């Protein structure tokens, strides 16, 4: 069992706590960091957590082995680097950082200090995406030709916060709220991108915005791709890979459709899971056994399924989309 501090206890931080406390066999929160102590005290007491307003309290506490960051995006790089230098393992909510340079520096700090870095991309763990990756690896597609996707939800309406209309914290429309999940999925399946172009079409600005973002990409392996996101419209997730012999489409959390040459169609409905607990359990299992209080000393750590290279490539695309939207031009993606 990893003893962790939850840093940031807003709407999403509370969702993380509810998914973990008394639910996970791998990780628990004994400390919560928030500037809203009075407003959060009842929730923290219900979930067996002490509270502090100071991030340094988590870094200086020898009982804390890991920090989970559910903080504003612009703070991630600085907090990751500080936690790494303090010897704490780090799980950071998406996006890892807002720039490729910051991502490289944050990852380098973790590697230098030999701490595990995990990123909160819970859609990676959806059963539909696990099944899609399994089918892609089986080779049924033949040569891969194209990938496309869409992810939209209504969070900007249902859970509006100031950062959702901030061009600093939330650039390029729904990019940080939804599009980052699609980027991670594409990078995991296709590798790094070579170049891209993107645009945002706004119907209404300000509080509870109405806009759509569309991105067209060319990957280094020669595959084309595009994806889009809309604020706000009913929840929809789709990742669709096209090959010379078949296509594979993940729909929502649990459904996958395979269409073969000749007309045959296979449909799969996967058992549901709690993706928040699954991703945090995966992070905890990536931490060496000597940090755990309840596992055998010879249990081998299992690397977090999103590699540091994939994390960096995701942010390289993220930043390039922002640049393309701002400059209305094709952008070369850094590596």
Image (cartoon, rainbow, N blue to C red):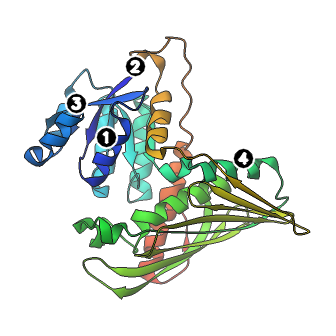
- Quarter of the image that includes the N terminus: top left
Residue 265 in percent (x, y) is at 81, 63
Of badges 2 and 3, nearer the viewer stands: 3
Residue 334 in view in this figure:
no
Residue 130 in percent (x, y) is at 64, 47
- Quarter of the image that includes the C terminus: bottom right
Marks 2 and 4 sit apart, C-alpha to C-alpha, by: 31 Å
Q: Nearer the viewer, residue 119 or 328?
A: 119
Q: Secondary structure at mark 1?
A: helix
Q: Secondary structure at mark 2?
A: helix
Of badges 1 and 4, nearer the viewer stands: 1
Dot 1 or dot 4, earlier in sequence: 1
Q: Is residue 127 left or right of residue 172?
A: right
Q: Are marks 2 and 4 in contact (CB under 8 Å)?
A: no
Residue 17's label in the rendered image is 1
Of badges 2 and 1, nearer the viewer stands: 1
Of badges 2 and 4, nearer the viewer stands: 4
Q: Are marks 3 and 1 in contact (CB under 8 Å)?
A: no
Marks 3 and 1 sit apart, C-alpha to C-alpha, by: 10 Å
Give residue 23's quadrant in the image.
top left
As drawn, which residue projects farthest toward the left? Answer: 38
Q: Is residue 84 above or below residue 220?
A: above
Residue 236 in percent (x, y) is at 52, 68
Q: Residues within 10 Å of mark 2 (few under 14, many from 20)?
A: some
Residue with the mark numbered 4: 134
Residue with the mark numbered 3: 48
Residue 302's label in the rendered image is none
Dot 2 or dot 3, earlier in sequence: 3
């Amino acid at each position: 069992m990893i003893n962790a501090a939850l840093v940031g206890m807003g709407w999403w931080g509370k969702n993380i706590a509810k998914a973990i406390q008394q639910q996970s066999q791998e990780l628990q929160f004994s400390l919560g960091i928030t500037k809203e102590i009075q407003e959060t005290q009842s929730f923290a007491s219900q979930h067996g957590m002490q509270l502090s307003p100071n991030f340094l309290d988590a870094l200086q506490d020898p009982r804390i082995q890991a920090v989970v960051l559910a903080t504003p995006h612009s703070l991630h790089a600085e907090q990751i680097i500080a936690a790494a230098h303090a010897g704490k393992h780090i799980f950071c909510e998406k996006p890892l950082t807002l720039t490729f340079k910051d991502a490289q520096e944050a990852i380098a700090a973790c590697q230098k200090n030999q701490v595990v870095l995990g990123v909160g991309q819970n859609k990676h763990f959806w059963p539909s995406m696990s099944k899609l990756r399994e089918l892609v690896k089986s080779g049924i597609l033949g040569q891969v030709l194209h990938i496309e996707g869409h992810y939209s939800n209504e969070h900007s309406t249902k859970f509006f916060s100031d950062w959702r209309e901030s061009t600093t914290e939330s650039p390029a429309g729904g990019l940080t709220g939804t599009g980052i999940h699609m980027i991670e999925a594409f990078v995991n399946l296709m590798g790094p991108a070579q170049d891209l172009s993107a645009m945002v079409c706004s119907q209404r600005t300000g509080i509870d915005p109405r806009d759509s973002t569309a991105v067209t990409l060319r990957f280094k392996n020669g595959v084309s791709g595009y994806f889009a996101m809309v604020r706000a419209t009913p929840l929809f997730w789709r990742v669709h890979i096209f090959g010379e012999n078949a296509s594979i489409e993940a729909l929502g959390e649990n459904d996958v459709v395979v269409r073969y040459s000749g007309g045959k169609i296979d449909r799969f409905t996967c058992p549901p899971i709690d993706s928040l607990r699954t991703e945090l359990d995966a992070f905890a299992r990536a931490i060496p056994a000597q940090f755990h209080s309840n596992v055998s000393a010879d249990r081998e750590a299992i690397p977090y399924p999103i590699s540091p290279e994939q994390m960096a490539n995701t942010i390289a695309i993220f930043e390039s989309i922002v640049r393309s939207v701002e400059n209305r031009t094709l952008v070369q993606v850094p590596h």
